[in-house]
Structures are given as structure tokens and as C-alpha cells.
Image (cartoon, rainbow, N blue to C red):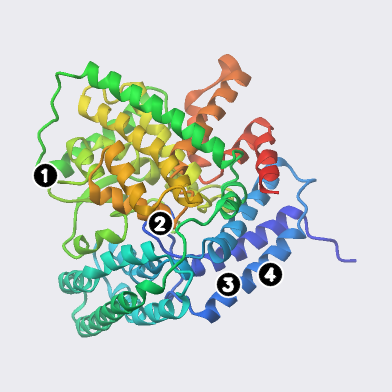
Amino acid sequence: MILPMPAHAELSTLAEEFWTWRLATQPDSYDDITRVERPSGWVPDWSPAAIAARRAALSGFADRYRTIDPSTEDTSVQVDHRLLGSALARVHWELDLLRGWQRNPGFYVDQALVPVYNLLLAPAPFGTERAHTLVALLRQVPSTLSQAMTNLGGETVGSFAEHALGLLAHADQDVVTAMSALAPHLPEECHADLAAATGTAGTALVAYRDWLRRHRDEFRGAVSIGPGAFGYFLHRVALLPYPATRLLEMGRQEWQRAVATETLLRHRYRHSRPPELPDLPTLVAREDVAEQAVRRFLVDEGILGQPTGLRRYRFAPMPDYLAPLTWLGVPHHASGQSRPGEDALRYVTEPGPDLPYFPLADARDPRCGIIHEGVHAHQLALSWRHPDPVRRHYYDSTPNEGVAFYNEELMLRSGLLDDEPTSALFVANAMRLRALRVEVDIGLAVGDLTLAQAADQLAERVPMDRETAVAEAAFFAGNPGQGLSYQIGKLQILALLNDCVQEQGKAFDLMAFHDRLWLEGNVPLALQRWELLGLRDEVDVADRLAS
């Protein structure tokens, strides 16, 4: 007699197979949190046959998932089951609801060039294997852009095409400039292949740009994905227990609180002046000292543990071969699951008053980057070592970005920035930005805002530089739900903290709470609440809203 496999064993097997498949099929994007390590020999493929194969594989995984009943298992197994369900829902969202591969010409700029950019983020040296991989990715660019011209059509969004054309206006030259600067870092025997592949990629980028120009008047799709599709994302993927209308209310209330906080701080620091900007070597050296000081502060104040061997988060000078391509992604080397101890690097340029919103704050005080991007680096490193393999992967931005945004105000209120008023003011202003992103994100998703209107709101109401505002609006329009993740994730964390304090009373341990939160930073907060407090009310509400 063959006994049935226990639910947890069957779930673990399915999760392992799913994530092996997902690492080879997940789309690339500007975001640094979603980056994955690709299997050896991987190149992007968005041909009609590949898309059909993705759908078939998803159907098979979903069928197996539905046969697993974890109800007799402990809560941790049930949480893992819902996690895998979220991952499956995300694939359906990407393929059949969001449909960037069918609606967004910029999607193919990402699929063609972001893999190249990601490969450049790890520091030198560039050995033969890495060089060959780079050449293979460049050689794949014409195929990827040919697939774009096959898949894009009447449902393609005109404003997405216009944004892509803006990127493509200089993309071919940027690739040539970057690869010319990279060549001296590669083995000499790879130089000819690199030059040939670069030329082929540049020609394909020009051809794609020309094709978009010829067909731009045929693209009549709407930016909005509609309330129904957006609701699927909110409740099936992100597992949020709030309808979009409630999310808007939450964002607007936080906007008011952020404006009040910034106003009070500006009054308190009304006689202060921004610090002078350092030169690049001084900035890198200051960040190294500041990062270690922040870690000591966290331990000394009993806020967050710093396990032995936890990697560093460091600034590094921007390499000449990377600088021309930073419009493709956050210039942050986060490493990966196979190298959780490898230091994370944030590449920085020579400070100056014309720097964009976030780099300018980092140049004035590196702690502004440490308390957000540095949190991502530490949270990911901890999650990659999670004893439960199902929880080592990215599921949705809400918990990850919620943790980093929560940490900013945590550091503000804990006194870390008391010695630098400009940094405290930046954190308060960034609170305005994250609150406004909720309104912008939802407005784009349900059709209340155009892409231009969203960029205007960001530029005028934060305020922020126009270049950053346009880039943010385009990214949120193409990735609904990401913009709201910062603010809503933070609010969920605050609610979870409150509930833990109420339940545990004097036994509540702030450091233990944060240590667990960072470790579980990939897990949606509704599931964390269920596992930590035995309350599955938010999961049940998300299910009702999704039905």
C-alpha cells in the first residue's frame, strides 16, 4: 500500500520545482528587490511559443497546488501554502492581466537590456565565463526585440510607447559607450566577440525604435488595467485586506500626517542649513564609517540585532561602464541567494547640487541610503538564509518595502538623525512621497490619472525633480501595486506591532519583534499576523474581497 505524501512534503517539492522554473521565466524590471540569479546559459525568451509554455507550466503547477490540503498541518505550513499560492497568482497576473509583454513596449527594453545591466552590477573582475554570458545576452537583444514587434499590437498603450521611445532615443549609444568602457576589464580574447555583439544589439535597438515610431498611432490601449484586474493583484498576489477605496483613504491620511511632520520639523530646524557636499572619495569613506555606526546604534538602543557575519552595505564609485546604463535599474548590487554573505554595493557618482532626489540626500548624509537601501540589503541577506526554503524568495513588494520605509521613521523617532537636521527633513519629505505614491499608483491602475498627470503630481506635491517624477510615474503605471507597497506595508507593520504590544504587554521585546520581522521580510503581513498572533482575519478578508 502506498501512503499519500504528507501535505508539507508535497508542498516543499512543488515549491522547489516552481522556484526553479520561476528563476528561468520571471521578467526583468528596473526594481532591485525583484532581481534573481539566472540558471547557467539563460537568455530571455518572450516568443509566442515561450509564452504558451509558461501558461502550460503555470496550469500544471496550479493543478498540483489545488490537490494539497494543509488544513491538518501547523500554521507555518498553512502560511507556506498561501505563500506559494501568492507566487502562482503573480505569474497569472503577469501573463494574463497585467500583460506587459502585450501592452508595454518598455517591457522589452527591460527584457533585452536589464539582464546585461544586472550582470554588470557585481564588482570586477570579469572572468571568461562572465564575459561569455555578457556576449550571449547582447546577442539575444535582436531576438528579444523581434519578439516585441510580434507581440505588441492594438492593445499596446500609446503613452508606454512614448516613454519607451524616450529611452530608446539614446539606448544604442549608451550600450556602445558602456561596452567600450567595459572592454579593458574583459579577457582580451573576448574583445572581438563583445564588439560584434554590441554592434548587433545597437542595430536592433535602432530598428525597434524606428518600428515604434512607425506604429505609434496604432497603439490604443489604456494605461489603466481596470479595477477588476487591480483587485486581483491586491487580494490574490499581495494578500491585502483592503479594497482600493480604503487604500486611498489610508494614503491620504498618511499624506496629511507627513505634511504635518515635515512642517513641524522645518519649524524646529528653521535656522539650519544643508551640509556641504563632499567629494566622491570622502563620500565613500563617510558611508563606510556611518554604516558601522548605524549598526552599533541599532544594537546599543535594543532596536535590531546584527548577527555575526551579516554582510556590509557599502557605497562604491560608479564604474565607467555602468554609468551610461543606470536608467535601466537601481545602481545597487544586492548579490543573490547563492552568495548571502557578499557585501551589497550602492554605486554613487561625484556629488553635486544637480543630483536627483535620492542620490542628493545620500550625498548629504549617507545614512539616508543606509536606513532604506541598506535595510533591503540586510533583510534580503537574512531571508536568503531562512531555515524554511519557501520563504527565501520575493513574493510582493509590500512586506519588503514596508520594512524599509518603516525603518526610516523608526530611525527618525529613535534619534539617529538628531545631529543632522537636513537628513531628518529628508525622511519627513520622503514620507510625503511614499504617501502620495498610494494615490498615484491607484489613480493610474483604475484610470483616474494619466501618466503625465501622475508625473505632475509627484513633481509638484513632494516636490521632486522632473526626471525622477517621470521615471517613477512610468514605472508605477507599468507595475501597478508597487507604488503603494511602501506606505501600506508600513501601516501593516505598525498595526502588527500594536497588536503584539497589546497581547504581550510588558513582555514585549522590540528587538525580538524586529529581528523576526526582518527575517520574515518576504512574507505578506497578513500571513505574518496569522502565524505570529494566530489571527487569520486579514487573510479571510483578502479572500472575501478577491471572491
Residue 342 seen by the camera: no
Q: How many marks?
A: 4
Helix, strand or loop status at disc 2: loop
Disc 1 to disc 4: CB gap under 8 Å: no
Q: Which residue is mark 1?
A: 352
Q: Label 1, label 2: how many angstroms apart (C-alpha)?
A: 34 Å
- Residue 449 position, x and y percent, is 42, 48
Q: Label 2, label 4: how many angstroms apart (C-alpha)?
A: 31 Å
Q: Identify the residue shown where x is 35% and y is 46%.
A: 311
- Residue 477 position, x and y percent, is 42, 54
Residue 261 seen by the camera: yes
The one nearer the camera, 142 or 80, is 142
Disc 3 to disc 4: CB gap under 8 Å: no
The label shown at residue 393 is none
Q: Residues within 10 Å of mark 1 (few under 14, many from 20)?
A: some
- Nearest to N terminus: mark 3 or mark 2: 3
Q: Which residue is mark 4?
A: 60
Tell me the quarter of the picture where residue 374 sits.
top left
Q: Label 3, label 2: how many angstroms apart (C-alpha)?
A: 28 Å
Q: Identify the residue shown where x is 47% and y is 43%.
A: 485
The one nearer the camera, 424 or 461, is 461
Residue 205 to residue 288: above or below? below
- Residue 202 position, x and y percent, is 25, 78
Helix, strand or loop status at disc 1: loop
- Nearest to N terminus: mark 2 or mark 4: 4
Given the image, on which type of amino acid does mark 4 rest? Gly
Query: Foreground mark, 2 or 4?
Result: 4
Q: Residues within 10 Å of mark 2 (few under 14, many from 20)?
A: few
Q: Label 1, label 3: how many angstroms apart (C-alpha)?
A: 46 Å
Given the image, on which type of amino acid does mark 1 rest? Gly
Q: Which residue is mark 3?
A: 54
Q: Which residue is mark 2?
A: 339
